[in-house]
Amino acid sequence: MLQRTRNGKSRTVLVAGGAGFVGSHLCDALLARGDRVICVDSYITGSKDNVRPLLNHPDFRLIEADICEFDRIDEPLDQVYNLACAASPPQYQADPVHTMMTCVSGTGNLLSVAEQHGASFLQASTSEVYGDPAEHPQREDYRGNVNCIGPRACYDEGKRAAEALCFDMLRSARVDARVARIFNTYGPRMQPHDGRIISNLLVQAISGKPLTIYGTGEQTRSFCFVSDLVAGLMALMDVDPNPQGPVNLGNPGEFTINELAALVLAMVPTVSKMVRKPLPQDDPQRRRPDISRASELLGWEPKVPLREGLRHTADWFIATVGSDAERKPRSSTVRTQPVSPEMGMRV
């Protein structure tokens, strides 16, 4: 049965970045509940393979476009999700100017589209707005510790600027905008070579290569399985009234990178050992969300423990990548600058 809006019509949802890791899972979930989905993606970091099973779905439409150049849609919309941005450090640092413009100009374009249609808008922000936090765990009222001129600023400051745009549009009553601050997310459809810690370690273990640990490995992250995150995004979009502020979405379970690597080694049959390299600049030492606000406002909390989610993710990598795990993908036209690998997962 089709999901219905208040005016009785079927709901039409635009998902920018819908062919990406998180975006494709969101498209699946929206279609499963009966929405009509318009996926917009440039394939800079997304992949058509992620949505190929949906191409013959009668309620799915795919548009290839960069949101920096996208400012209109030819049919009514009820909701707009903005998940369009390179999300891992090697990807977003490869073309930092494009990353910044995607966050600022691209978000501005999508807000204008939402305004034109009277659609609700959800911005996928990130825990990176907290930088290398001096507060732990991180609450939404913490203003962060970001290096505004460092190599990660294109993403960190870009996402902060995108949040400012959203709340300016909300305060001026132009767009019903909501902001999710997403913490480390993982699951099937992650790109093997995107530079995120879970994909790095799994691909290295599957290939029998050394597992790379940056710094001491005692820095911490909190890992949220993709199905939990998607449920949180949809709950935040649909909650009434508007929360009027950002909402953290992530799993508060905290693990050191050494603990994560040990889990991978125990889970994947491999001859791999650990090797250590210097910690990249501005890499956060601790990262864990306070999700009290999401729990109170949305009734949301993650359900999939790391060991279970990691097993699903490992199985997907083994089945999908297998012996070709170390084969590098063809470079994109915008990824031209070499960058250092970095710990952590950004969304």
Image (spheres, helix red, strand yellow):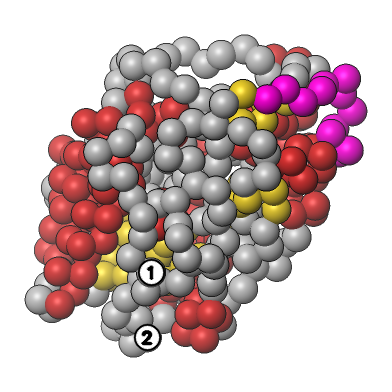
Residue 54: x %, y % from top left: 51, 43
Residue that appears at 50% across and 77% down: 294
Q: Position of residue 198 (x, y in %)?
A: 65, 38
Other-residue count near label 1 (Cα within 10 Å), few / some / many at <14 / 14–19 / ≥20: some
Q: Which residue is mark 2?
A: 240
| Residue at the spot 75% in from the left edge and 60% down from the top edge | 305
Q: Which residue is at the front of the view, 341 or 67?
A: 341
Where 62 sits versus 37, above or below?
above
- Residue 204 got which mark? none
Look at label 1 and name its amino acid.
Tyr
Residue 29 in the figure: left or right of residue 69? right
Residue indicated by mark 1: 142
Q: Nearer the viewer, mark 2 or mark 1?
A: 1
Residue 153: x %, y % from top left: 30, 41
Where are the magenta residues, as a range? 265-276
Residue 290 makes an appearance in the image: yes
Q: Residue at x 53, y 80 (%)?
A: 292
Question: Residue 156 or 278: which is nearer the viewer?
Answer: 278
